[in-house]
Amino acid sequence: MLVSAILTSVGINSALCVLFVVLYSILKKQPSYYEVYIPRLLTEGNSKRRSRFNLERLIPSTGWLPKAWKLSEEEMLSSSGLDAVVYMRTITFCLKVFSFAGIIGIFILLPVNCSGTELHQIDFEDLYSNSLDVFTISNVNRGSKWLWIHFSSVYAITIFICYLLYHEYNYISSKRIAYFYSSKPQPHQFTILVRNIPVSAGSSVSDSVESFFTEYYPTTYLSHIVVRRTSKVQSLINDAKQLYRRLLHLQSEPSEQKYKQVGLSEKKVDLLDHYGKRLEDLEQNARLEQSEVSLAKDTHAAFVSFKTRYGASTVFHLQQSTNPTHWLTEEAPQPNDVFWPFFSSSFMGRWISKLLVVVACILLTILFLIPVVVVQGLTNLSQLEVWFPFLKSILTLAFVSQIVTGYLPSLILMLFLKIVPPIMEFLSSIQGYISHSEIERSACNKVLWFTVWNIFFATVFSGSVLNQISIVLDPKNIPTKLAVVVPAQASFFIAYVVTSGWTSTSSELFRIIPLICSLMTKCCAESTDDEIEVPSIPYHRDIPRILFFGLLGIAYFFLAPVILPFLLVYFCLAYIIFRNQFINVYAPKHETAGKFWPIVHNLVIFSLVLMHAIAVGIFSLKKLSLASTLVLPLPVLTLLFNEYCRKRFLPIFTAYPAEILIKKDREDQNDATMSEFFDKLATTYQDPALMPIQYSADSESLNRPLISSAEMSM
């Protein structure tokens, strides 16, 4: 790819970034768009709508920048939780890495690459017509002593990244412990989920649970709640909720719009009365369905609560039965984090679900190779002219060819990739995970490795599925093949960083999709502040993107250091924009207390090993066999370092140690509010579908419960 094509992509995306930022700074100040740009502040009461016109609202401003910049880590921790802190520290980690790498890459490695003549000399008089390959290590002459600078840089960046990884792992693990110490007693700390509960003839699941835990844990067992299938009840409640909102909307409409003509006759129906009767029917059906739920077969699962955190942790870590498929224990999520729609009734059902998800992920990976092949065809003009000969005359135009080869491929790939996170989230939801946070972490892993395989490896090898499989089946030649194909794709990944990084992050600030949805809602219905829903940040979408760009930066650090400035711009944009979004837009719905960091750590380690494999191959191709041999200890030492971190820090992210749990339990002994907490704990994990939900058939009050207390006791 020519320099001119890359500059065209940079120009287009830079203009889009500026446009999004300017539009955001204007629309954010418009009261009618508060629910799009500051929903969190609006619901928390920190911002109010102002109807009075002010000319200042139409003038772009940068007032949001200082507020985002001044946000401290402690403020973010208290307002958005530890997951938000880990997310922002991932971005700052990448900023530190690529600031150090940028100094070495731009001021040392890039001049060495440009001074080579392996490909051809750089024409500085006509810089735009040069290929980006002359800025890569491919342009350094074979056997050149200058390659030892690249060798030294590989060692330097590896040591620096490992030092930062250790520091971050240590810091975040200590933050996780401190976060636990500072937290008030939480229901999930005293509760576990027990699944595959065996039931003897003539007894119920509740009887089995009560008998088992009273016998084996008499001093710590507190209470339990059996999990039931309530999907039908929940569906009826959702229908009632939608109908109730429609009734509220009708009340605000003019009187002539409250009547509707039915059939061919001119008779009109009072919609308020019509929908009111339908709401009453839904309420009655919900009551009947709930009564049936209490008599129906259980899911053989229950939330079991204990008197101490240590007691709950002990049960969680022990095998409860001689049959390892019975009495399976899991950590209970927070009550609002429970994913109620799916509770697999058996060990076998859960295993089959996981198998189906694996098959679906493989099929999706294979299908995604189609847009990858199309994209690679667009980057090659000669191949494109063969595919579409009728476009040959248009492609001869310089500007058109620059857009087609520099901007269009990365745009197409980015658009196709946007459908992957929702699909992976759905696949994770059918695997049997019991919490939204577990589903999100599973989806995060799936999206991450899907991106690494399909965007990186599928792009650099640019072949068929069989070709990629043959590469994996021949591991001895992987370093050599990587050394050949990875540098050749540097220009494509620069364009991808600019498009998927710069523009996507700026569009995150502008919030295009929520803005469109808001405009459509305003056209169709009246909206109130009560209907504003504060979103949570989709970690399974954003963390893989950050880590993938980190992988690109590490892999191309010594191959094509010209990519580093583009990455630094992306991470700077992400740093300031997401801090702003945590203040104004996103509010935490679920909290994992930093469990996303091991995913970050593992991907960085993989990126380092990938860089080492490429280094071994590139030094072999460049006839510098000694350097290739001396690089071999690096992946071994990196993996040993990873194993040390896994032993040292990972257990803290899996479960809290007994020392911490016992200390917290001892502190609670002097807390007078614990008795009240335990009383509430007995019903905390009640399925929301079985709780009294207040709706009114006359749509004027919310005082009558959907399901009465008497019916609940039945």
Image (spheres, grey):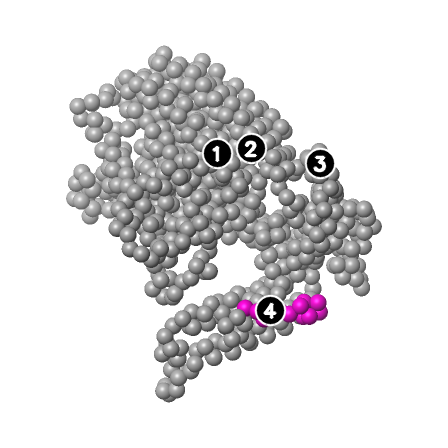
Q: CA distance from mark 3 to mark 1?
A: 29 Å
Residue at point 74% right, 42% down? Answer: 669
Three-letter code for the amino acid on which mark 3 is drawn: Lys
Q: Is residue 369 left or right of residue 112?
A: right
x and y, in percent, of residue 463 in the image = 38, 38
Up/down of 457 relative to 220, above or below: above
Single out the mark in the foreground, 2 or 3.
3
Tell me, yes or no, whether the two marked residues, 2 and 3, touch with CB atoms within 8 Å. Answer: no
Three-letter code for the amino acid on which mark 1 is drawn: Arg
Q: CA distance from mark 2 to mark 4?
A: 45 Å
x and y, in percent, of residue 263 in the image = 39, 84
Q: CA distance from mark 1 to mark 4?
A: 45 Å
Residue named by callout 1: 89
Residue named by callout 3: 663
As helix, strand or loop, the secondary structure at mark 1 comes to helix
- Work out whether mark 4 precedes mark 3 in sequence or the reverse, and give the earlier one: 3
Bounds of the magenta span?
702-714
Residue named by callout 2: 172
- Work out whether mark 2 precedes mark 4 in sequence or the reverse, and give the earlier one: 2
**Of residues 133 and 664, which is closer to you in this image?**
664
Q: CA distance from mark 4 to mark 3?
A: 42 Å
Three-letter code for the amino acid on which mark 4 is drawn: Pro
Q: Is residue 604 magenta?
A: no
Up/down of 653 relative to 638, above or below: below
